[in-house]
Amino acid sequence: MRVKEKIIESERYSAILFNIATGVNYNEILSKELKTEPNALIQHLKRLKKEHFIIGKKGGKFNKNIYSINWDKVKEELFEYIKSIDSDIKLKESFYENKKFENFLKELFIKFKEENATIKIFFESFVGHVLQDFLSFPMKDDKKIDELRAIITKIGDTRTFHINNLINYAKEIDLNKL
């Protein structure tokens, strides 16, 4: 039996999601942008809907399927990824429900499309950036600092290029407009 690849680890599914985030959200436009056969794309979109990564609605001038990202699912996957690195990490529900965080994530997601990377690489870059920034603050608890360094080490430095680009993207976003 063939094992399905995880959506966040798939370049194909990630490209679809990054494109939808940028507003390329109709079958025909997605098919052209991704250079994918329409029938294959429809199968990918069905799986993304089934696994709750996208929402499809009829709309527009010709009542076509219009797709949008289910940001709650993306946040859920991000937090699951963070927990997979270190199961002791606790995330406050208020952080998960924070609209500014969601809007910040959307902006970064849109900009990350140009990286031709997977969502998992986006998560690795995001977590690497957040944790590196966190470590730059003075902390009194050396044990916590060591734990955070261990988490960054688990991610590894193979994503340095993507992390640096993500940092640059984050600097471009006007947080006051979110």
Image (spheres, rainbow, N blue to C red):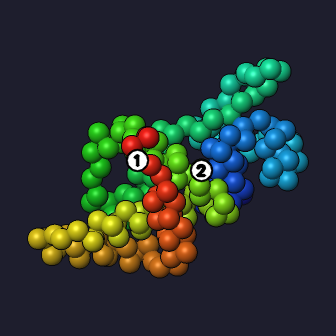
Tell me which amino acid carries mark 2: Ile
Residue at x-position 43% and y-position 40%: 178
Q: Nearer the viewer, residue 137 or 153?
A: 137
Instruction: Answer with mark 2 or mark 1, whichever residue precedes in sequence.
Output: 2
At label 1, the amino acid type is: Leu
Dividing the picture into quarters, in which one does residue 88 lie? bottom left
Q: How many marks?
A: 2
The answer to whether residue 129 shows anywhere in this view is yes
Crowd tier of the residue under label 1, counting other residues whose Cα lies within 10 Å: few below 14, some 14–19, many 20 or above: few
Task: Give the structural element (helix, strand or loop) at label 1.
Answer: helix
Q: In the image, is 88 to the left or to the right of 1?
A: left
Residue nearest the observer in this picture, 163 or 16: 163
**Viewed as shown, does residue 128 lie left or right of 2?**
left
Q: Looking at the picture, does residue 167 appear above or below residue 154?
A: above
> What residue is shown with label 2?
110
Residue at numbered disc 1: 175
Q: Is residue 40 visible?
A: no
What secondary structure is found at the residue carrying circle 2?
helix
x, y percentage for residue 79?
40, 51
Q: Residue furthest left?
A: 140
Residue at 80% across / 20% down in the picture?
61
Could you tell me which residue is drawn at 81 percent across and 50 percent down?
A: 33
Query: Front-most of 53 and 167?
Result: 167
| Pick the front one: 7 or 22 | 22
| Residue 129 x, y percent position in the rendering | 41, 66
Position of 144 relative to 91 (above/below)? below
